[in-house]
Image (cartoon, helix red, strand yellow):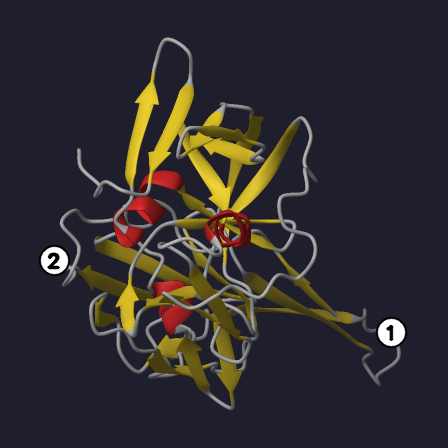
Amino acid sequence: MFTADSAGRVGLFAIVENEFPGDDDLWYYFEVQVVDPVVTPPSGGGGGGGGMPSASLSQTKADYDSDKGGDITVTLNLNNFALKAVKNGSYTLKEGTDYTISGDKVTIKDSYLAGLSAGTQTILFEMSGGNNPKLTITIKDTDTPLAGFAYQPMKPAYPAGTAVDAIKTNNPLFLDGEEVDFPAIKVDGWNWLKLRDVAMLLNGTSKQFSIGYDEATKTITITTGAPYSPLGDELEDLLSGDFTALASPQKLIFNGMAVDVAAYNVEGYNYFRLRDLMIMLDIFVDYDEATGQITLDLTKPYEE
């Protein structure tokens, strides 16, 4: 029979019956000291906690030039764990939209990276166990002035997909002296207009422009001077109250030139800041703080 005490000692008790009559049974006690075994942790695998293997990346740093663009692809060694999520701070990237997975390759898409602010961004790969690998991406912005623009449009302030609060705004808008109905939203104190509404209002004028869209690349194209082809829902007031706008992941090509400009998506429509559109189209805009009136003058160039 074996017993063990708190110190890890094991006692072996044995009862042996003597074969000779008249003798008492003999009792023997054996004490065995049990030594804890030495466990050698597995080697390699990304340096997980306590020497256990964890998932790892083929690289932990990468650079992204917002002027050049491009995807960033890394190899993820799962080490028998599963990838649960890819995160940047509190934002969880969307598979298929912000990143893709093919075998052991994880690709952070250019459309997501283009919406990040300049500086350091840390992408965390949340695993089912072990350590969570991190990829530090340095977003470089050379701030090269866009050719043909006297002023520069506002760059994205939030990563693509970020939800921000928005409200419907009703600032009166005058175009060449006439008031026009113009549904718009307000985000961070600025007026944002649906791109197709602006195209509709300017159609047939000296500042008209056409809009194209490539679903595969999530790219919007604007071509000035070309007529706009309406879809039929332009200038409809579809919004009410407070709602959420999402920082748009879509790219913009203006007259063949890539423009890194802030935009929001609301219920499937893209909204751009009024002043950014006027900068690109070179249209004079004036704002009266006392009345909240916005005035556009197609005969004058944009100025600040």
In the displayed structure, would residue 135 be above or below residue 122?
Answer: below
Residue visible at 46% across and 46% down? 90
Q: Amino acid at mark 2?
A: Pro
Foreground label between 1 and 2: 2
Residue 19, position as x, y percentages in the image: 84, 85
Q: Quadrant of the N terminus?
A: bottom right
Query: What kind of element bears circle 1?
Result: loop
Res 20 visible: yes
User: For mark 2, does the 10 Å Cα neighbourhood hold few (<14), some (14 to 19), or many (20 or more) residues?
Assistant: few
- What is the x, y in percent for residue 131? 42, 65
Structural distance between the alpha carbons of marks 1 and 2: 112 Å
Residue drawn where x is 32% and y is 45% of the image: 278
Name which residue lies at 44% across and 80% down.
Answer: 106
Name the disc covering residue 22, or none: 1
Q: Residue furthest bottom?
A: 103
- Residue 218, image x and y in percent? 49, 71
**Lower position in the chain sequence, tag 1 or tag 2:** 1
**Mark 1: few, some, or many residues within 10 Å (few <14, many ≥20)?**
few
The answer to whether 271 appears left or right of 15 in the picture is: left
- Determine whether, in the image, residue 113 is placed left or right of residue 200: left
Q: Secondary structure at mark 2?
A: loop
Q: Which residue is nearer to you in this view: 192 or 94?
A: 192
Q: Is residue 125 visible?
A: no
Q: Quadrant of the C terminus?
A: top left
Q: Is residue 82 above or below residue 288?
A: below
In the rendered structure, which amino acid carries the disc numbered 1?
Gly
Task: Say left or right for 25 vs 262.
Answer: right
Q: Are marks 1 and 2 in contact (CB under 8 Å)?
A: no
Which residue is the site of mark 2?
145
Q: Position of residue 138 (x, y in %)?
A: 20, 62
